[in-house]
Image (cartoon, rainbow, N blue to C red):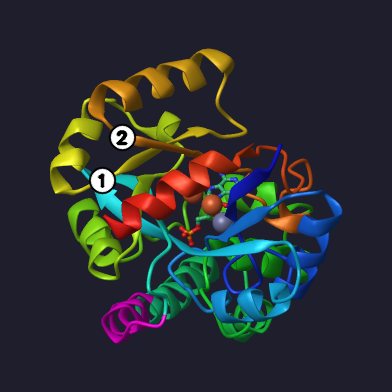
Amino acid sequence: MKYADLHVHTVESDGTYTPAQLVKEAIQRGLSALAITDHDTVGSVAQALTEARETELEIIPGIELTAQQDNQEIHILGYFLDYQQQGLWDKLRLVQQNRVERVYKIVENLKKLGVELNAQTVFNISGRGTVGRMHIARALLLDGWVNSTSEAFRKYIGDNSPAYVCGFRLSVSDAIKLIRDAKGVAVLAHPYILDSDELITEFVDYGLQGLEAYYPEHSQSQVNFYLDLAKNLGLLVTGGSDFHGSVKPDIKLGTIKVPFELVEKLRFAKKS
Ligand code: AMP
Ligand code: ZN
Ligand code: FE
Ligand code: FE
């Protein structure tokens, strides 16, 4: 049997693996395909494709867009998108600028709480790609303000914590449109986080094409529920580990993997 992990982050967002390291690890683990799905960037896709050239591993160009509906954070995965498309890069550049501005706002909030963190420390950790709260958490850990990144979220930057700032987010309908305009297939990531599953039918009206039924946080009954729902709504099914490297140490590459036939269905959905 051939398997694929369809949800993977690199150093371009908040993962700790480079594309080269990912390709090597995926081959070692016997995977046949890997989708690179960084938060709000396709910056690692080209390098991953290059690294996997002349190997048995297929790299699927992907993304995980941060979106919002009714004050709820929703993640939309995009697969097989034309990752070099200019319109996509233009929009993502705006999102990146907003993320940088948000780091300065969170640093201001931390200062008011007596935590003197330099924004540059955060940017040194994040590098050239998407900057976010995970990098702030790592900077707080590096400078000794917390003993773990989870403590950083709990005390300072978690959704309900005192230094939290909500970033600019695409609407779900804009996120789906951005993916589809780039000829990609739009899939709802980790649907268990939704307050109400009724939102899914609304997302289908926006052009959603699939559900990430297989996910580390999903119980078997949740997996079954989303498989049924996908069938009833005529949606594709995907799954993946949401691998982030050492910042999510319990999750290994391929912890969740799906049969390769699901990749073929995604590929077909792009064409048709
Ligand atoms: P951002 O997109 O900058 O708001 O950061 C979101 C990322 O922060 C998510 O992908 C999670 O990996 C991480 N995150 C959010 N809340 C928590 C939390 N309470 N504990 C650990 N990580 C979190
Ligand atoms: Zn992440
Ligand atoms: Fe996510
Ligand atoms: Fe993810």
Question: Which residue is at the front of the view, 234 or 195?
Answer: 234
Between 227 and 123, the one lying in front of the other is 227
On screen, residue 201 above or below 154: above
According to the picture, the residue beneath numbered tag 2 turns out to be 235
**Which stretch appears magenta?**
84-95
Q: Residue furthest right?
A: 28
Q: Could you say which is closer to the camera, residue 15 or residue 157? A: 15
For label 1, the residue is 208
Dot in front, 2 or 1: 2
Residue type for callout 2: Leu
Residue 41 disc label: none
Give the amino acid type for the residue marked by disc 1 in the picture. Leu
How crowded is the residue under tag 1: few (<14 C-alpha within 10 Å), some, or many (20+)?
Answer: many
Q: Is residue 241 magenta?
A: no
Q: Secondary structure at mark 2?
A: loop
Identify the residue at image location x=40%, y=78%: 96
Query: What is the C-alpha distance between the residues marked 2 and 1?
Result: 8 Å
